[in-house]
Image (tube, helix red, strand yellow):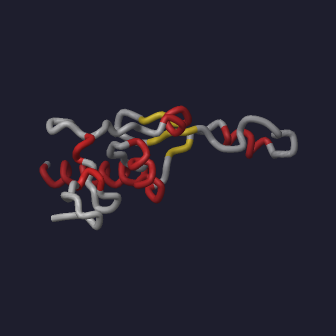
Amino acid sequence: MQNPAGLPYDSRFDPKGSSRSYLRPSGAEMPKSKSHKGLLKRIKITKSGKIRFRSPNSRHIKSNKTGEQVRSYRRPRYARSGDMKRYSMLLRRPLRSQEQSKANELVREANSAAEA
């Protein structure tokens, strides 16, 4: 096959459709997946795979908030199931929400009651 200039065709110089395989050695692996460092600094992943984070609005400007609000900010918060897909994609690992953990506990209790 020839290019428009009449020279022999070489895929390395083709601007479109080139896989750029000539840049990778034949035994090269894919690049490593890296977790999102900004998210890792703001959360803690529990042993069971839940995501715990600090309450928003809990750091300053609390003078115009009620005591009940301020006390509620001290509680740790857990990620909801709607956000878990996004978090697991950013962190490159499977995660569980608090609702999933509770559901799994109920299933385990039901199974143990059925066995007994």
Q: Position of residue 85 (x, y in %)?
A: 40, 55
**79 lies left or right of 12:** right
Residue placed furthest toward the right: 64
Q: Position of residue 66 (x, y in %)?
A: 81, 45
Residue at horizontal 74 percent and vertical 44 percent from the top = 68
Query: Which residue: 28% across, 61% down?
Result: 17
Name the residue furthest front: 6
Q: Nearer the viewer, residue 48 or 14?
A: 14
Q: Nearer the viewer, residue 110 or 116?
A: 110
Coordinates of residue 14 in the picture (x, y in percent)? 30, 58
Asked if residue 53 lies left or right of residue 69, the reply is left
Residue under the point 48% across and 53% down: 80
Is 56 on the left-hand or right-hand side of 103?
Answer: right
Examine the rendering and report whether any part of residue 37 can be seen. Answer: yes
Camera-side residue of 3 and 116: 3
- Residue at 36% from the left image edge and 43% from the top image edge: 92
Residue 45 placement: quadrant: top left
- Count all numbered tags in the image, as a single digit: 0
The N terminus is located in which quarter? bottom left
* Extreme residue toward the bottom, this view: 4
Front position in the image: 23 or 51: 23
Residue 64 quadrant: top right
Can residue 109 be seen at all in this image of the molecule? no
